Image (cartoon, rainbow, N blue to C red):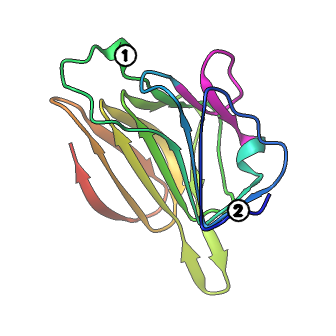
Amino acid sequence: VKAGSTTNVTTDSLAINATLESFSVTLAPRSSDTDINVGLDTPGVFSISTSELDLIDADQLTVGRSDSLPTSTPAEERGDLVVSAPIGPFSFDRLVLRANGNVTQTEGSTITVRRVEGDDISGSLSVFAGGRINLPELYDVAVSVSGEASGTRNDFVFNNRTPLKLQNVSG
């Protein structure tokens, strides 16, 4: 499927069975409290598998949503995002992960965002959470990491295998 410059998909469940080409792709659940799984197809949550990620041909991929929820919103109504399998490298050079709750990963579930074209190396990861960001596995992000862990006492934990530039990190 070839789309325009921006493709936004908001749905309760997702199945990508053919190549999706667009400059920017956003995949998000309809509800702000829906949990998101990146890496494995998981029943009962909004999920995208690594094989589906491989079908996306875009410069930027955004997965999830981050709404401006009141701080009094209970944790179970926020919607977490978990990286549950190693993901990347893929065709996109910017990956954005968004969750109203926490962003975490399972053991061994790394992220690679690195595109090499001749002498040019690109790749950035942005992570935004209404809760904590806990991504301690060894990642391979080529150029930069940015993001925000909102709320009080919410940490932003990230570990990369090569030096990179941190941009706009707050939390």
Q: What element carries label 1?
A: helix
User: Which one is nearer the viewer's eye here, 13 or 155?
Assistant: 13
Give residue 75's position: percent from left, percent from top. 32, 16
Residue at (47, 25) in percent of width and height: 31
Q: How crowded is mark 2: few (under 14 residues within 10 Å), some or many (20 or more)?
A: few
Quadrant position of the N terminus in the picture: bottom right
Magenta stretch: includes residue 2: no
Asked which quadrant contains residue 46, the reply is top right
Residue at (37, 38) in percent of width and height: 66
User: Which one is nearer the viewer's eye here, 41 or 142?
Assistant: 41
Magenta stretch: includes residue 38: yes
Q: Give the range drawn in magenta.
A: 36-50
Give residue 55's position: percent from left, percent from top. 77, 52
Tell me the amino acid under the disc marked 2.
Ala
Residue at (42, 47) in percent of width and height: 159
Asked which quadrant contains residue 5, the reply is bottom right
Q: In this view, does 119 lie to the left or right of 132?
A: right
Kindly give the residue lying farthest to the left in the view shown. Answer: 152
Q: In this view, does 65 lie to the left or right of 46?
A: left
Quadrant position of the C terminus in the picture: top left
Tell me the amino acid under the disc marked 1.
Glu
In the picture, the disc for residue 3 is 2
Among numbered discs 1 and 2, the one appearing first in the sequence: 2
Residue at (45, 68) in percent of width and height: 143
Q: How crowded is mark 1: few (under 14 residues within 10 Å), some or many (20 or more)?
A: some
Q: Name the residue under label 1.
A: 77
In the picture, the disc for residue 156 is none
Give residue 111's position: percent from left, percent from top. 57, 47
State whether residue 167 is above or below residue 121. Answer: above
Kindly give the residue lying farthest to the right in the view shown. Answer: 18
Give residue 152's position: percent from left, percent from top. 15, 30
